[in-house]
């Protein structure tokens, strides 16, 4: 497994969060203007980016567990 895989997932998660935020802002603008169809569209796209962000964050977490989780020493408890 690549050492950079965790970092790549963090970067992708951040990018998707940024896209989601932009779509939420756009949804707010359309909502204020009374164009609820466009607002809903952007909210839906934002939710999709949120799901992608969560996926990449989860993959980064899995990578960390694989690389640094190790075995639990029962005698340390």
Image (cartoon, grey):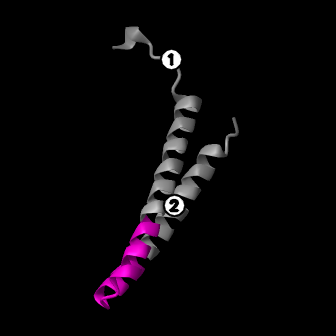
Q: Secondary structure at mark 1?
A: loop
- Identify the image quadrant of the C terminus: top left
Mark 2–mark 1 contact, CB under 8 Å? no
The total number of labels drawn is 2
The image quadrant of residue 30 is: bottom left
- Check the picture and name the quadrant holding the N terminus: top right
Q: Callout 2 environment at 10 Å: few (<14), some (14 to 19), or many (20+)?
A: some
Determine crowd level at label 1: few under 14, some 14-19, many 20+ residues with C-alpha closer than 10 A: few
Most extreme residue toward the top, as rendered?
A: 75
- Depth check: 26 or 76 in front? 26
Residue 68 vs residue 3: left or right? left
Front tag of 2 and 1: 2
Looking at the image, residue 11 lies above or below residue 43 = above
Q: Is residue 29 above or below residue 7?
A: below
Residue 69 vertical position relative to residue 36 in the rendered view, above or below: above
As drawn, the label of residue 14 is 2
Whether the magenta-drawn stretch holds residue 28 is answered as: yes
x and y percentages locating residue 68 in the rendered image:
54, 30
Front residue of 62 and 55: 55
- Classify residue 22 as left or right of residue 36: right
Residue at (35% x, 87% y) in the render: 35
Mark identifier at residue 61: none
Q: CA distance from mark 2 to mark 1?
A: 30 Å
* Residue beneath the point at 47% across and 61% down: 48
Mark 2 vs 1, N-terminal side: 2
* Most distant residue in the bottom direction: 33
The residue range painted magenta reads 24-46
Which residue is identified by label 1? 71
Residue occupying the far front of the picture: 37
> To which quarter of the image does residue 43 belong?
bottom left
Towards the viewer: 43 or 60: 43
Report x, y in % for residue 51: 46, 55
């Amino acid at each position: 497994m690549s050492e950079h895989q965790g970092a790549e997932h963090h970067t992708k998660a951040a990018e998707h969060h940024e896209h989601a935020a932009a779509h939420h802002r756009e949804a707010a603008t359309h909502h204020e203007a009374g164009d609820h169809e466009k607002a809903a569209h952007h909210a839906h796209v934002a939710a999709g980016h949120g799901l992608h962000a969560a996926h990449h964050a989860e993959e980064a977490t899995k990578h960390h567990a694989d690389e640094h989780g190790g075995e639990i020493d029962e005698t340390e408890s």
